[in-house]
Amino acid sequence: MPQPSLKPQDVVVLAKLLSYEGGRPSMAQVGVDLALSASEVHAALKRLAASRLISNDLNEGRPLLESVEEFLVHGLKYVFPPKRGGVTRGMLTS
């Protein structure tokens, strides 16, 4: 079975989990807050738990702050490297 890898929306879900004070709301509420479906939130929580960025209990799913800090400071740029494209025609954007 292949090892699940993090997706960009997993980082968004992780950041949203950090913003909640107290207990984590339902997956449906997290999905509404992020404009994701509850199943996408559930899959993100499973991948985050497999990566040891949140506690393994999906009902609680509290972020492990030391691991999250280390990942955001040192690991994020290696997981999602920028892909530079060639020169194209079009309007410049900021």
Image (tube, rainbow, N blue to C red):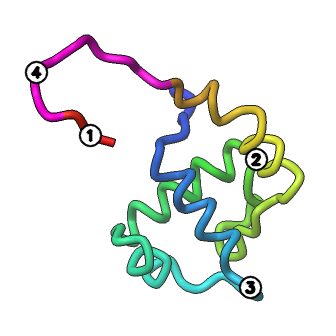
Mark earlier in primary sequence (3, 1) = 3
Q: Nearer the viewer, residue 2 or 76?
A: 76
Q: Residues within 10 Å of mark 3 (few under 14, many from 20)?
A: few
| Left or right relative to 61: residue 70 | right
Tag of residue 93: 1
Look at label 4 and name its amino acid. Arg
Image point (39%, 80%), residue name: 32
Q: CA distance from mark 2 to mark 3?
A: 20 Å
CB atoms of marks 1 and 4 within 8 Å:
no
- Number of numbered discs visible in the structure rendering: 4
Look at label 2 and name its amino acid. Arg
> What kind of element bears circle 4?
loop
Image location (x, y in percent) of residue 66: 89, 52
Q: CA distance from mark 3 to mark 1?
A: 37 Å
Residue that label 2 marks: 52
For discs 2 and 1, the disc positioned in front in the rendered view: 1
> What kind of element bears circle 2?
loop
Q: Quadrant of residue 94?
A: top left
For discs 3 and 1, the disc positioned in front in the rendered view: 1
Look at label 3 and name its amino acid. Glu
Q: CA distance from mark 2 to mark 4?
A: 43 Å
Q: Compared to 24, does 67 lie above or below?
A: above
Q: Residues within 10 Å of mark 1 (few under 14, many from 20)?
A: few
CB atoms of marks 2 and 4 within 8 Å:
no
Residue that label 3 marks: 21
Q: Residues within 10 Å of mark 2 (few under 14, many from 20)?
A: some
Tag of residue 89: 4
Q: Compared to 66, does 2 lie above or below?
A: above
Q: Which residues are magenta?
A: 82-91
Look at label 1 and name its amino acid. Thr
